[in-house]
Amino acid sequence: MTLPTLALLAQSPAPAAGGGMNTLVMMGLMFVMMYFILIRPQRMRQKELEKLINGVKVGDHVVLNGGEHGIITSVKEKTIMVKVADNVKIEYERSSIASISKKTDVVEATTTAA
């Protein structure tokens, strides 16, 4: 084979018409799927947790991010006081609350277990 023939064989075929448009559509669909699979559920969980933290009251049983369990004894603007044992109260940031169980939920659980 001659050099010009090899050069012609090495060239890739011309792209089909509309090839760039298909790529843009596929990338757009990927971003939409990522939004509905990853971003939207995370935002919903964050709003739900924020709503729970803002509605916390004295007497609620809480689990904190570090794994501590306790009962809220006082609520301030940005902090809460949590009783973790007899005569042991610790002040935490509100943002450290991982989950909340209301006083009635705990009473129901203890009465059904007995």
Image (spheres, grey):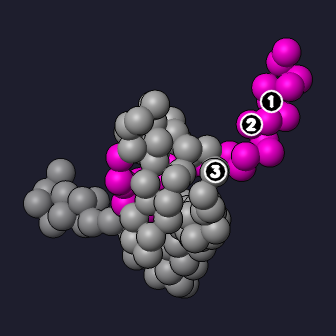
In x, y percent, where is residue 105? Answer: 78, 42
Q: Amino acid at mark 2?
A: Val
Image vertical order of residue 73 relative to residue 108, above or below: below
Placement of the C terminus among the 4 image quadrants: top right
* Extreme residue in the top direction: 114
How far apart in space, not on screen, are marks 2 and 3 (Cα)? Answer: 9 Å
Q: Is residue 11 left or right of residue 52?
A: left
Q: Please give the name of the residue rendered at 24% of the width and 59% of the height, measured from the top-left corner.
A: 10
Q: CA distance from mark 3 to mark 1?
A: 14 Å
Report the magenta residues as a range.
Answer: 90-114
> Which residue is denoted by mark 1 in the rendering?
109
Name the residue type under label 3.
Asp
- Pointer 2: what residue? 106
Marks 2,3: beta carbons within 8 A: no
Secondary structure at badge 1 equals helix
Instruction: Specify whether 11 is left or right of 28.
Output: left
Q: Is residue 91 left or right of residue 104?
A: left
**What residue is pinned by disc 3?**
60
Along the line of sight, the residue nearer the viewer: 83 or 55: 83
Residue 22, quarter of the rendered image:
bottom right
Give, as a three-letter code, the residue at label 1: Ala
Residue 80: x, y in percent? 44, 59
